[in-house]
Image (cartoon, rainbow, N blue to C red):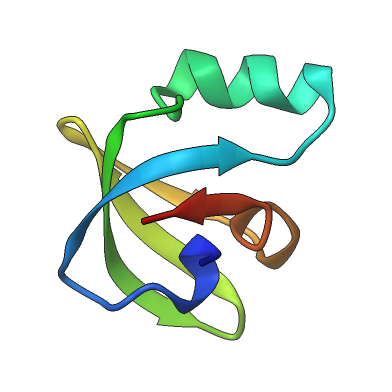
Amino acid sequence: MPIAIAPIGREMKIVRILVDEKTKKHLFNLGITIDAKITVLSAQNGGIICLVKDGRLALDRDVSTKILVA
């Protein structure tokens, strides 16, 4: 399921990232990689705030629909 519709407060594992290589490299530098743990803290208007490792990140609607979690 895309992280945009993941349940709030539940730790999930990233299984696939469906973006171009430039964006994938940027996300990798932020800690968003395959098998990384991610928790959605809040979701509003398609954008989400998530917890990755020890930092909070804001993802827009386009990117959050292309990160798949399980």
- Looking at the image, which residue is at 15% across and 32% down? 54
Q: Position of residue 68 (x, y in %)?
A: 53, 53
Hey, which residue is sitting farthest bottom in the picture? 45
Q: Is residue 18 left or right of residue 4?
A: right
Q: Is residue 62 left or right of residue 15?
A: right
Q: Is residue 32 left or right of residue 23?
A: left
- Residue in front for this viewpoint, 32 or 1: 1
- Looking at the image, which residue is at 68% across and 53% down? 66
Q: Is residue 69 left or right of residue 26?
A: left
Q: Position of residue 50 (x, y in %)?
A: 33, 55
Q: Position of residue 29 (x, y in %)?
A: 50, 14
Give the total of numbered labels. 0
Tell me if residue 35 comes above or below residue 42 in the rendering.
above
Tell me if residue 43 comes above or below residue 51 in the rendering.
below
- Residue in front for this viewpoint, 66 or 16: 16
Q: Position of residue 40 (x, y in %)?
A: 30, 63
